[in-house]
Image (cartoon, helix red, strand yellow):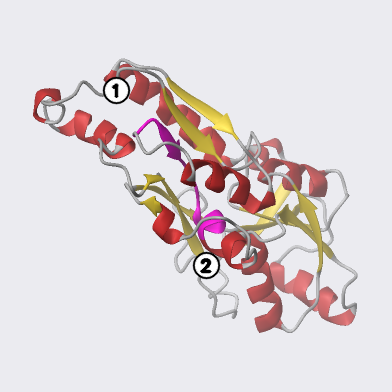
Amino acid sequence: MISRNTSRIWALGAIMLLLLIPCGQIFAEEVYPNRPIEVIVPFAPGGPLDLGIRFFSDKWADVIGQPVVVENKGGASGAIGAKYVAYAKPDGYTLLATSDSPLITARLERKDAGYDLDSFRLLFNFSKIVVFFSVKSDARWKTLSDFIKEAKSQPGKLKYATWGPNSATVLATEMLCKVAGVKLTFIPFKTSPDSLTAIAGGNADMAVTFSLSGLRQSGLIRPLAISDEERVPDYPNLPTLRELGYPIKYTSQYMG
């Protein structure tokens, strides 16, 4: 995303166009870009959005002939990084790579956020993401139903780890709690990998994340369910919340 008031080329959109049509048809009046492009990730390093945008940034740099520099400005559930981009010079050289959390949930809970949806112009979505509900690989809960059953019998005892506090994953968990009639205690962490590490180390009971950050293959965690309407191809044996009797579909988008 870029500042809405820009009168010049829309940077990430332009990068995508460079892959599809000749450069000369886009940049006939001005050579763009002629210096490095900064992409702001409004979260701490190591999360799925951060890793994804860093992978793409190398490809974009090869195409446009200028460095694409990824910088993390985390804090306040993404609001700090989003505000930074909202107030940046609207010249196409400062972009925001984000999910819906900084744009919606974080902003709505902060009257002084300093930006709104009209502060940005969406260029494109580059990934659909789902929420994973995971526990430690040797946890006593073999299914999500096992976890919910214990949570009902001991309100507030079981703890879930995710980044937040005003994040989409917190919202997804609270939706599940409401539908299932349970109360869980929220333990905030900076990133999805931190949350997964917390359950692997026994510092929380469940992690609610937008990715498994490679820990699925480590044997340290066991995902119990996902929040999409259909099973995902990479995890064909992982049931959806709907399959388990919880009429919830919660997906998000990574966008620029």
**Where does the image place residue 115, in percent across and percent down from the top left?**
51, 56
- Which residues are the magenta region? 92-103
Left or right: 178 with respect to 227?
A: right
Q: CA distance from mark 2 to mark 1?
A: 37 Å
**Type of amino acid at the residue the image marks with label 2:** Tyr
> In the depicted view, which residue is nearer to us: 246 or 165?
165
Left or right: 2 with respect to 201?
A: left
> Residue 251 has which mark?
none
**Type of amino acid at the residue the image marks with label 1:** Pro
Q: Which residue is mark 1?
A: 33
Q: Mark 1 falls on what kind of element?
A: loop
**Where does the image place residue 175, in percent across and percent down from the top left?**
63, 75
Q: Residue at x 28, y 20 (%)?
A: 63
* Residue 66 in view, yes or no: yes
Q: Residue at x 70, y 68 (%)?
A: 144
| Quadrant of the drawing holding the N terminus | top left
Left or right: 93 with respect to 195?
A: left
**Where does the image place residue 195, in percent across and percent down from the top left?**
74, 48
Q: Mark 2 falls on what kind of element?
A: loop
Q: Which residue is mark 2?
A: 250
